[in-house]
Image (cartoon, rainbow, N blue to C red):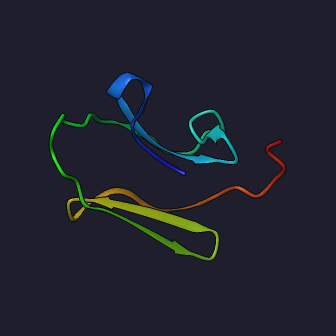
């Protein structure tokens, strides 16, 4: 799952099986969303890699999602 504007609108992240990749030492970044504004989000998946663009700009370069049991 891509979490955009999470943590009280302070960060963006990729979450795996209900866990934030931030907790699993994978990339997060600071960021906010504006109210009443439309955003175009593109998520690409290739094999075990996920990348995210927002409004045509790279939010997350493709990163490998770690395998494992997150339950």
Residue at point 21%, 65% (across, down): 56
Placement of 66 over or under 11, stated as above or below: below
In the image, taking residue 19 as reference, residue 33 lies left or right, namely left
What is the x, y in percent for residue 11?
A: 38, 33
Placement of 13 over or under 1, stated as above or below: above
What is the x, y in percent for residue 1?
A: 55, 51
Placement of 46 over or under 19, stated as above or below: below
Residue 21 falls in image quadrant = top right
Q: Residue furthest front?
A: 36
Q: Across the whole image, how many numbered discs are drawn on residues?
A: 0
Residue 18 falls in image quadrant = top right
Q: Residue furthest bottom?
A: 46
Q: Residue furthest left?
A: 37
What is the x, y in percent for residue 58?
A: 29, 60
Residue at point 15%, 44% (across, down): 37
Q: Quadrant of the C terminus?
A: top right
Residue 42 falls in image quadrant = bottom left
Residue at point 22%, 53% (across, down): 39
Residue at point 81%, 53% (across, down): 68
In the image, taking residue 69 as reference, residue 50 lies left or right, namely left
In the image, taking residue 9 as reference, residue 45 lies left or right, namely right
What is the x, y in percent for residue 63?
A: 53, 60
């Amino acid at each position: 799952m891509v979490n955009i504007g999470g943590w009280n609108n302070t960060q963006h992240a990729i979450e795996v099986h209900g866990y934030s990749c931030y907790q699993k030492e994978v990339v997060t970044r600071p960021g906010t969303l504006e109210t009443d504004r439309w955003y175009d989000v593109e998520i690409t998946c290739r094999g075990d890699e996920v990348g995210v663009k927002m409004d045509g700009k790279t939010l997350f370069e493709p990163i490998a999602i770690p395998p494992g049991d997150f339950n």
